[in-house]
Image (cartoon, rainbow, N blue to C red):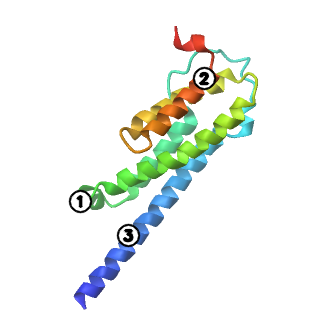
Amino acid sequence: MLKTWQSRLATLQARSLRLWQEMAVRRAIETLRKGTDKSVASRDYSSQTSALPTGPSTYLLQSLNSLLHSLHALPLHRLHTNPSPATSLLEEFSKEALTVAGEFLELLRGMEGGEEIKRQLVWDVTLIGMIVGESEDREKWEMTTTKFQQLVSVDLFQS
C-alpha cells in the first residue's frame, strides 16, 4: 500500500511540475510576444535617436523576470534536490521563444525601415542564445541571430 501511495504521489508531483512549467512558459512567452507584434514592428522610431541598443528590450527583461519569479515560487527544496525543473523550464522557453523569433523575423523581412527594432532584436536573440548555452537549441539560436543580423545594415557590425 505504501508503494502504491508513493507511486501516485510521484505521478501527481510530476504532473503538477509539468503544469507549472507550461503556465510559467506561457506567461513569459505572452510577455515576449507583446514586443514582437505588428504594431511594435510598424512603430515610427524616426524621432528617436538611432543609437545602437545597449541592453535587452523591456519585453525580454520582463519575460525573463517572469521565468525567475516562477522559479522562486517553486519550493526551494525541489531545486536543491533536483535542478532539472529550472533546466527544463529554460529549454521549453527557448523552444517557444525560437518560434516567436521566427515569426517576427518573417514579419520584419517584408518591412522597409524599422532598423531600430531590428537592431534591438539582434541584441535580444543574441542574449537568449547565450543564456541557452550548450543546449540542443544552440545552433538554432545561432542561425536565428545570423538571420536577424542580415536584416540590419552590415556597417553596424563593422564599427
Q: Position of residue 72 (x, y in %)?
A: 37, 53
Q: Which mark identifies residue 81? A: 1
The image shows residue 138, relative to residue 126, as above or below, that is: below
User: Is residue 53 depicted above or below 20 in this figure?
Assistant: above
Quarter of the rendering containing residue 73: bottom left
- The residue shown at (55%, 55%) is 26
Residue 54 rendering spot, x and y as whole percentages = 51, 21
* Left or right side of 4 for 59: right
- Pointers 3 and 2 in contact (CB under 8 A)? no
Position of residue 102 measured from the top left corner of the image (x, y, whole percent) = 61, 40
**Badge 1: residue crowd in 10 Å (few <14, some 14–19, many ≥20):** few
> Is disc 3 placed on a helix, strand or loop?
helix
In the foreground, 143 or 34: 143
Label 3 environment density (alpha carbons within 10 Å; few <14, some 14–19, many ≥20): few
* Location of the N terminus (image quadrant): bottom left
- What residue is pinned by disc 2? 150
Cα distance in 3D space between marks 3 and 1: 14 Å
Tell me the number on the disc at residue 14: 3
| Furthest residue in direction bottom, as rendered | 1
Q: Are marks 3 and 1 in contact (CB under 8 Å)?
A: no
| Amino acid under disc 3 | Ala
Local crowd size for mark 2, using a 10 Å CA cut-off: few (<14), some (14–19), many (≥20): few
Q: CA separation, marks 3 and 2?
A: 42 Å
Residue at horizontal 64%, vertical 27%?
A: 117
Q: Residue at x 42, y 53 (%)?
A: 89
Q: Amino acid at mark 2?
A: Gln
Out of 94 and 120, give the one closest to the viewer. Answer: 94
Q: Is residue 105 left or right of residue 13?
A: right
